[in-house]
Image (cartoon, helix red, strand yellow):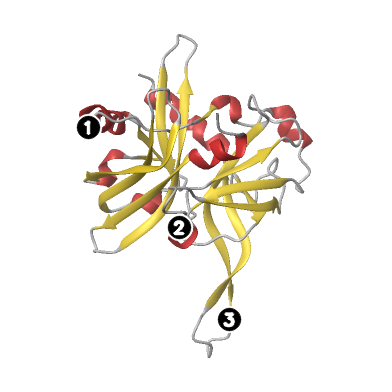
């Protein structure tokens, strides 16, 4: 059985999108499952809307699983969908979209495959007592694919560590965001930002999903410099509470 950090890596999936303009981009998505009291479930994939917007084709790079459901690390499948943007439901106000997991399950069934896709759940979202205890100095982890970088042989993301730069229990600049002090680059958009064990986390193993990275701050340079801006190691994170706004729209 995988340890906590290894399972955390597998909650993400690499996205490869080809836009209608011909541009090819990479991004990060992660798995999230909604549940209802009557036993209904809705497994989803989550990413930033700007990653999949105008994507005429997209691919997930998924790790295969054995008959017991354990990962076959290094054995992966590139699952491609045409009209990719049409599979996603974007949020009306924020840079976040969800896609039902069903098309991936249909692909797996049609090809005799199983995929290893551990998901965050609603019990990983921060509760009011957890939010009230946050100071804005918490350590955070962020698995993703910055600049498309990944462990291709093992199909694993890069795992970055940083700190909250503003408190997740307050809205930054009047929006449901907070800042993290962590190197953030294109390709990491859609990465889950999590806290493990401090304070006592929301999930069964103390894993709290604080939010979703959607942008990195840039520092402008002198106009005479060939490079106009450089990352300043601050990332904008949409609070995970935004995921709950989809729930009423997707009930099976």
Residue density around tag 3, few if under 14, some if 14–19, many if 20 or more, within 10 Å? few
- Vertical comparison of 179 with 2: above or below: below
* Numbered label tally: 3
Crowding at dot 2, Cα within 10 Å, few <14 / some 14-19 / many 20+, comes out as: many
Q: Position of residue 144 (x, y in %)?
A: 50, 51
Name the residue rendered at 52%, 62% in the picture. Answer: 185
Q: Residue furthest bottom?
A: 224
User: In the image, what residue occupies the spot 45% across and 11% down?
Assistant: 39
Q: Name the quarter where the C terminus is drawn.
A: top left
Res 6 → quadrant: top right
Q: According to the image, label 2 marks what residue?
A: 187
Which of the two marks, 2 or 1, is nearer to us in this view? 1
Residue at image location 49% in from the left, 39% down from the top: 10
Q: Position of residue 40 (x, y in %)?
A: 41, 14
From the viewer's perspective, tell me whether residue 58 is left or right of residue 138. Answer: left
Q: Mark 3 — residue?
A: 221
Label 1 residue SS: loop
Crowding near the residue tagged with mark 1, few <14, some 14–19, many ≥20 C-alpha atoms within 10 Å: few
Expressed as whole percent of the image width and height from the top left, the position of residue 139 reads: 72, 47
Q: Decide if residue 41 is in sight here.
A: yes
At numbered mark 3, what does the secondary structure look like: helix, strand or loop? Answer: loop
Q: In the image shown, does 1 or 199 lie closer to the viewer? A: 1
Mark-to-mark CA distance, 3 and 1? 51 Å
User: In this picture, is 75 found above or below 27?
Assistant: above
Mark 3 or mark 1, earlier in chain: 1
Which comes sooner in the sequence, label 3 or label 2? 2
Give whichever of discs 2 and 1 has the lower sequence position: 1
Q: Nearer the viewer, mark 3 or mark 1?
A: 1
Q: Which residue is mark 1?
A: 111
- Quarter residue 113 falls in: top left
């Amino acid at each position: 059985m995988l340890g906590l950090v290894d399972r955390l890596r597998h909650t993400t999936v690499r996205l490869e999108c080809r836009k209608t303009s011909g541009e090819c981009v990479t991004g990060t998505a992660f798995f999230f499952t909604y549940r209802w009291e009557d036993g209904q479930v809705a497994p989803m994939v989550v990413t930033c809307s700007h990653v999949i917007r105008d994507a005429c084709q997209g691919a997930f790079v998924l790790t295969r699983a054995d008959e017991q459901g354990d990962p076959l690390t290094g054995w992966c499948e590139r699952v491609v969908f045409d009209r990719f943007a049409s599979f996603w439901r974007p949020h009306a106000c924020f840079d976040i979209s969800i896609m039902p997991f069903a098309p991936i399950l249909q692909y797996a069934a049609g090809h005799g495959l199983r995929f290893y896709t551990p998901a965050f759940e609603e019990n990983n979202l921060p509760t009011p007592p957890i939010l009230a205890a946050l100071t804005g100095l918490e350590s955070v982890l962020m698995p993703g694919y910055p600049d498309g970088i990944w462990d291709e042989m093992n199909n694993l993301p890069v795992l970055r560590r940083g700190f909250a730069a503003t408190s997740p229990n307050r809205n930054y600049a009047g929006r449901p965001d907070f800042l993290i002090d962590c190197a953030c680059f294109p390709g990491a958009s859609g990465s889950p930002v999590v806290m493990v064990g401090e304070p006592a986390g929301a999930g069964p193993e103390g894993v709290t999903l604080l939010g979703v990275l959607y942008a990195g701050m840039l520092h402008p340079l002198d106009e005479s410099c060939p490079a106009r801006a450089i990352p300043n190691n601050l990332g904008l994170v949409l609070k995970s509470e935004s995921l709950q706004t989809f729930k009423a729209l997707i009930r099976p």
